[in-house]
Image (cartoon, grey):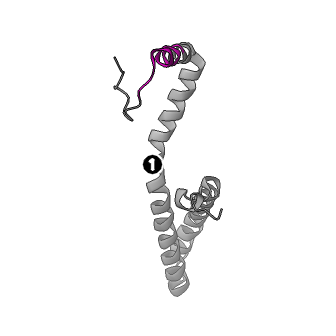
Amino acid sequence: MNDRSDPDDIVLSPHERLALRRMEAELSADRRLTRRMRHHMNRRLRRPVSRRWLPLSTAALFSASVFLVVMGVRTSDPAVLWCFAVLWPLTLLQGSRLLCRAGREGPSRAERDTPWR
């Protein structure tokens, strides 16, 4: 009577299954751990959306800023220069957020799994 419901087809003895069920029961009874795990999973599920939009918005803001500064210098139109003056701090803010996030994430999984590190 082996328990083969495990995805890795690992056969557990009855004593091991009982110990595993006890551990699972203790963990499921811990409400604080459950709340923290739920919060952590929600953050992980939301994160890919911001991962896509932050680089795209930074690139769009940078492109618009470069366009506005070139057009402002060429035409000397105060309205264009004021638009650049408003847009440039937002571009710097997004760029700094992007750089901070890149530094926080560290090296990629492929770089960490190399044998020489």
Residue 6 screen position, x and y as percent? 38, 29
Residue 17 colored magenta?
yes
Q: Residue at x 60, y 62 (%)?
A: 115
Q: Is residue 32 above or below residue 90?
A: above
Residue 29 placed where, x, y %?
54, 12
Overall secondary structure of the magenta stretch? Answer: helix
Answer above or below: position of 68 versus 21: below
| Residue at 65%, 62% in the rendered image | 117
Q: Is residue 83 above or below residue 49?
A: below
Screen quadrant of the N terminus: top left
Residue most extreme to the bottom: 74
- In depth, the one of 67 and 13 nearer the eye is 13
Q: Which residue is mark 1?
A: 48
Q: Position of residue 75 (x, y in %)?
A: 50, 85
Magenta stretch?
A: 11-22
Q: Position of residue 16 (x, y in %)?
A: 50, 19
